[in-house]
Image (cartoon, grey):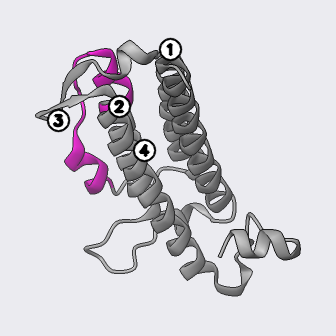
Amino acid sequence: MPQHDDIAREFIETARHCLSKGMHKIEHCVNQLSDEQLWWRPRPEMNSIANLMLHLSGNVRQWLINGINGARDTRNRPREFGDRSNAPKAEVLAKLQAAVREADEVLASLDAEKLIAQRRIQGWDVSVIKAMFDSISHFRGHVQEIIHMTREQLGEQYQFDFVPKGAEQVSAND
């Protein structure tokens, strides 16, 4: 029977893997886009991929870095969506990569006892495990949005990151 430490370690490693895979998928999309495409909006009132990346940087910092560590929250969420700077994609990507790297370090430092510690994040009283679950699922949701927006812009030029090979992979990924 698994021990609490084994379960905690598996949960933490799975969370880190999920965040890392999501970051990989964003990088894969961004590498196919120009600076202009990164800031493209389907409609004026909708977000660009760049705004979503800035939003994810803010969310990861608020929930997984500052929130878990109990640091002061300095996030300005409206600025993430209101940014119209057209900053180069390398700059926007570097900001998100740095946040994900820092979050991974925080997650790697956790243990079973820390997972159940209580934190107040964005006005919510949550356990560290809930903060992780909420933030990483939020991250992955926006990853899918970024993939969709990339495919919308590139059409047939979009390069898939993973193409199933063989019957086992095709059925496993349906």
Q: Which mark is residue 122?
A: 3
Local crowd size for mark 2, using a 10 Å CA cut-off: few (<14), some (14–19), many (≥20): many
Numbered disc 3: secondary structure: loop
Work out whether 86 lies above or below 121.
Answer: below
Q: Which mark is residue 18?
A: none
Taking the view exactly as shown, the residue that stands out farthest to the bottom is 156
N-term mark: 4 or 1: 1
Is residue 165 visible in the rendered structure shown here?
A: yes
- What amino acid is at disc 3? Gln
Q: Does residue 10 appear to the left or right of 62 in the view shown?
A: right
* x then y, percent, for residue 89: 56, 52
Quarter of the picture containing the C terminus is bottom right
Quarter of the picture containing the N terminus is top right
Residue of label 2: 129
Mark pair 4, 1: CA separation: 17 Å
Residue of label 4: 136
Residue of label 1: 109
N-term mark: 4 or 2: 2
Q: Nearer the viewer, residue 102 or 113?
A: 113
